Image (tube, rainbow, N blue to C red):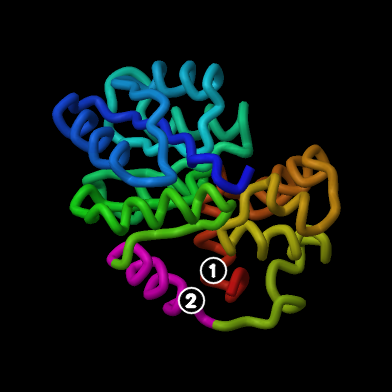
Amino acid sequence: MPDDPIRVMLADDHPVYRDGLAALLGSVPGIEVVATAGTGEEAVAQAAELQPDVVVMDVQMPGIDGIEATRRVTADSPHIGVVMLTMAEEDSTLFAAMRAGARGYLLKGANQAEIVRAITAVARGEAIFGPAIATRVAEFFAAAPAAATDQVFPQLTAREREILSLVAAGRSNAQIASTLFLSPKTVRNNVSNIFAKLHVADRAAAIIQAREAGLGT
């Protein structure tokens, strides 16, 4: 139903911050906090059991960290949107979160309106970043030199270049499959072939190469 609240789970290992955020969000009309977790393992288990619409996830947690927890949550339940809410500002952490499947990334200094806006957007299937993060991402991408798609990565097939361009635009495998009307397995196979041909180990490295070549704009 249109009036159903957005079901949110919070994962953070600092009880004072976690409980404070739970109280803050619990007072917002249209948002229901269904659970909180203090470790990455708890976050994965509760997300699987409760199937919230959105998980607000800290990066630094005991046991498996928020990046790995996000990877497991989105792999098991691709429809769950994850918003990273963290003190970490490094580009490597940001891209690792994106690679893991996070669709939002906010710093812990974000105010209530920014957090609510991110949760609402991610619940609708959108991707959102806080103003400071968005500016840095835009600057990183703007620095990439332009190049014609058919002139870069000649070792890739046309389909692989198309998929790489979507990877560089921050799309998940599930989103790429939907966009190109392919099966998730076909996308996974193509992404694996791309990594091998580009001699990269992970999605973040592929994104950097692709953006430097002008893909994903």
* Residue in the picture at 41% in, 41% down: 31
Q: Judge the density around disc 2: few (<14), some (14-19), many (≥20) Cα neighbours within 10 Å.
A: some
* Residue in the picture at 51% in, 31% down: 52
What segment carries the magenta color? 132-145
Q: Position of residue 73 (x, y in %)?
A: 53, 29
Q: Position of residue 151 (x, y in %)?
A: 73, 78
Find the distance from the CA under tag 1 to the CA under tag 2. 6 Å
Residue of label 1: 211
Residue 73 lies left or right of residue 197; in this view the side is: left
Circle 2 SS class = loop
In the image shown, does 205 or 46 lie closer to the viewer?
46
Residue 100 visible in the shown view: no
Circle 1 SS class = helix
Residue of label 2: 144
Name the image quarter holding the N terminus.
top right
Q: Position of residue 42 (x, y in %)?
A: 39, 17
* Residue in the picture at 25% in, 47% down: 88
